[in-house]
Image (cartoon, rainbow, N blue to C red):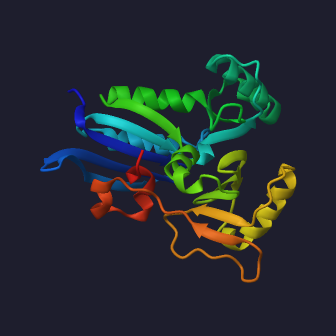
Amino acid sequence: MLPSLRDQITVLVSPEQLRLVRTGAQLTRRGLSERVLDKKSIPCIADGEYSWSAALQALQEALGGVKPASARVILSNQFVHYAMVPWNEALSNDREAVALARHSFVQLYGASADAWVLRTNQDAPGAELLACGIDPRLLESLRVMFVAAKFRLKSVQPALMAAYNNGKSSLRGRNGWFVQYEEGCLCLALLQQGRCRSVRTLRVGDDWQEMLPVILEREAYLTELDVSSDEIYLWAPEQGKVGLPVGGRWHLTRMQAVIRHGLMPEYEGRYTMAMMSL
């Protein structure tokens, strides 16, 4: 069975939760419009040798017997390693950029990083490269799974990049911390004029809101970058009212995701990553 060209399934894969949203196109007087066909949230228990194995097992079961479609996967930041790579004017192509990134990853994470699949992104000519590294076994497992289910896997994207790109227009020219929250994890990106200058992922507990000012004070000290800002741009669509301890110097702005227009009637915070504009 060939995948339906009008249907797309977007999957958010995290250690303890799998979220899937299937959308389809319908013809209206204004042309083709997307609508939600199905959405589900499947809890997982992270165990075994790889933190992503339980989520992939749940995904395999979820795809079984489902009509094939094109697919897009967003990976939790807990499955991704990040690094900022200084720009080198001697670089002439993407291959050389990846080679430079690999050298930086090995220095940061050790010899195991030499086997990771790396991708780089550059905000502007001459700017630092934001690089991410993913275990090739995870990517290969996803590819094999979708091929077996006769889905067409269009893309695999880290959660940080998906959220950052979605909110990029509102972050343009801003200085401050872009903070992305997932259950048990914070991803912190320091922005200068809207461009990412440093990235760090941390494990956190239920008290992360109270601890966030202390965490950011420490990170600001460790970065050694001349970026002075009291602004926090928080991406936490699943959370309700998020606040900070009273009396601190930090100013919190909750980021609002840009959701694809046709999907708004079915929108829920926990499905934000699967329903936002690409």
Q: Is residue 19 visible?
A: no
Does residue 212 appear to the left or right of 107 in the view shown? left
Residue 235 location, quadrant: bottom right
- Above or below residue 59? Residue 163 is below
| Coordinates of residue 249 in the picture (x, y in percent) | 77, 74
Quadrant in the picture for residue 175: bottom right
Residue at 25%, 31% in the rendered image: 3
Instruction: Give the residue drawn at x 78%, y 30%.
Output: 104
State the residue at coordinates (69%, 58%).
Answer: 177
Q: Quadrant of the N terminus?
A: top left
Q: Is residue 120 left or right of residue 265?
A: right
Q: Quadrant of the C terminus?
A: top left
Whole-percent x, y for residue 19 in the image: 41, 52
Q: Is residue 34 above or below residue 89?
A: below
Q: Position of residue 155 (x, y in %)?
A: 44, 33
Tally of numbered discs: 0
Judging depth in this view, the residue of 68 and 220 nearest the camera is: 220
Residue 248 percent across, percent down from the top left: 77, 77
Which residue is at the front of the view, 1 or 108?
108
Q: Does 140 appear above or below 228?
A: above
In percent of the image, x 32 and y 40: which residue is there? 63
Query: Is residue 72 at least partly visible in the picture?
Result: yes
